[in-house]
């Protein structure tokens, strides 16, 4: 990740990478109902980014904005603006990342999902969790949702397109999660614990994979055709419930292989064996490690885990702004889509020049 340029000579270029509906979306999301002291939405997002990517306080960012004639605002005034801008910043982040999704040219469009915890200063055990979806082809993230610690990791939290293959770790290998992905027309490849997922045969009889681990070869893989019952919504999947009440049955494969130390690991996939053999599934699952590298970059280079406040009114806006900066940075470093000889995308309705009231 590179540091986001926010000086006058660079800002106009960065502005072309932001969504074209900044003004409309800011008002729709109640981030800029009145332009008192802040001339437009571009000025507001610029100050939010400056606060997120620098070590400046809100008071210092307000002084910086005044010096550059970006906005005439005080520290408390900027605090209020950022506090009210959470939903708008979520919209901007979604648009920035959506604009970078490439069209698949062939093969399997793969998406990797995982979550990371973000902590700030203070004694209280309040945590934030970033639920992230990345494209292993570029290593860049394509979607992110911020929740508090009560927001669990689940596949149904994400949106997928028909034909995509979703990679996840054991936290995502649930019957309801797999069902949500299949309902979207996508497929799942996830590591799972046989004791935490009910697996059956085509007739609905239980298949106890843990009892079959002795047949797993030292090198290579073994696979079993299984069917996964999806519990009713009112039932907790880890509790005892009658498979006859399942709302759906998902055809899948359980693939077992051994590590170098001899441990057996199980991979669940809904991709047909004729389309993706067992060894290919295991190889594809290895791509999941890329999301761990992304989290390391976000925290070590962009310092996403250096929250100025763990539970302050602007904590979420700060994180969203920093994630927007990361999305813009990966666009600057790895431009996707057609390359323009002038270095940026031309728009039919370019943003108007800022005018101060």
Image: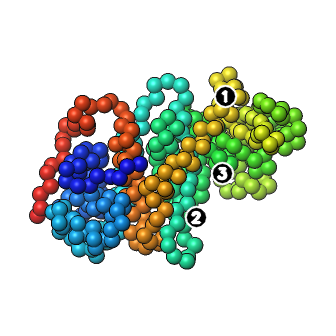
Residue at numbered disc 3: 171
Q: Residue at coordinates 21% horizontally, 65% vertically from top-left?
A: 65
| Mark 2: few/some/many CA within 10 Å (<14, 14-19, 20+) | few
Q: Which residue is mark 2?
A: 150
Give residue 125's position: percent from left, percent from top. 58, 73
Left or right: residue 225 versus residue 272 is right
Q: Earlier in the sequence, mark 1 or mark 3?
A: 3
Residue 71 in picture, x, y percent from top left: 19, 65
Q: Position of residue 185 (x, y in %)?
A: 56, 34
- The residue at the point 51 percent across, 48 percent down is 294
Q: Is 160 situated above or below 50?
A: above
Q: Which mark is residue 280?
A: 1
Identify the image quadrant of residue 319: bottom left
- Going by the image, does 274 lie left or right of 299? right
Please state which of residues 49 and 351 is positioned toward the viewer in this rendering. 49
User: 81 or 230, which is in the foreground?
Assistant: 81
Q: What is the CA distance from the residue labelled 1 to the residue labelled 3?
A: 22 Å
The dot on residue 350 is: none
Residue 276 position in % (x across, y down): 65, 26
Work out which quarter of the rendered image holds the C terminus and state it: bottom left
């Amino acid at each position: 990740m590179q540091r986001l340029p926010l000086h006058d000579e660079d800002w106009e270029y960065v502005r072309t990478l932001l969504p074209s509906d900044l003004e409309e979306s800011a008002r729709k999301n109640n981030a800029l109902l009145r332009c008192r002291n802040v001339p437009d939405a571009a000025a507001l997002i610029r100050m939010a980014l400056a606060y997120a990517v620098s070590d400046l306080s809100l008071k210092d960012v307000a002084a910086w904005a005044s010096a550059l004639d970006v906005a005439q605002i005080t520290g408390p005034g900027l605090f209020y603006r950022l506090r009210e801008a959470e939903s708008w910043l979520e919209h901007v982040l979604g648009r920035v990342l959506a604009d970078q999704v490439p069209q698949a040219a062939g093969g399997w469009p793969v998406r990797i999902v995982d979550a990371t915890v973000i902590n700030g200063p203070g004694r209280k055990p309040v945590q934030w969790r970033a639920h992230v979806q990345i494209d292993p082809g570029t290593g860049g993230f394509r979607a992110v949702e911020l929740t508090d610690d009560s927001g669990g990791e689940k596949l149904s939290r994400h949106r997928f397109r028909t034909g995509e293959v979703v990679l996840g770790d054991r936290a995502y290998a649930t019957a309801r999660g797999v069902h949500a992905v299949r309902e979207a027309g996508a497929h799942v490849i996830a590591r799972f614990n046989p004791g935490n997922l009910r697996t059956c045969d085509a007739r609905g009889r239980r298949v106890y994979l843990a009892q079959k681990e002795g047949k797993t070869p030292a090198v290579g893989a073994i696979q079993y055709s299984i069917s996964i019952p999806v519990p009713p919504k009112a039932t907790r999947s880890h509790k005892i419930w009658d498979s006859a009440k399942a709302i759906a049955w998902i055809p899948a494969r359980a693939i077992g292989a051994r590590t170098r130390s001899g441990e057996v690991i199980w991979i669940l996939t809904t991709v047909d064996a004729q389309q993706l053999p067992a060894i290919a599934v295991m190889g594809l699952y290895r791509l999941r490690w890329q999301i761990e590298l992304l989290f390391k970059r976000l925290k070590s280079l962009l310092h996403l885990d250096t929250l100025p406040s763990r539970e302050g009114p602007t904590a979420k806006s700060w994180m969203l702004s920093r994630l927007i900066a990361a999305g813009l940075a990966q666009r600057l470093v790895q431009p996707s889509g057609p390359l323009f000889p002038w270095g940026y995308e031309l728009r039919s309705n370019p943003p108007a020049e800022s005018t101060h009231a």
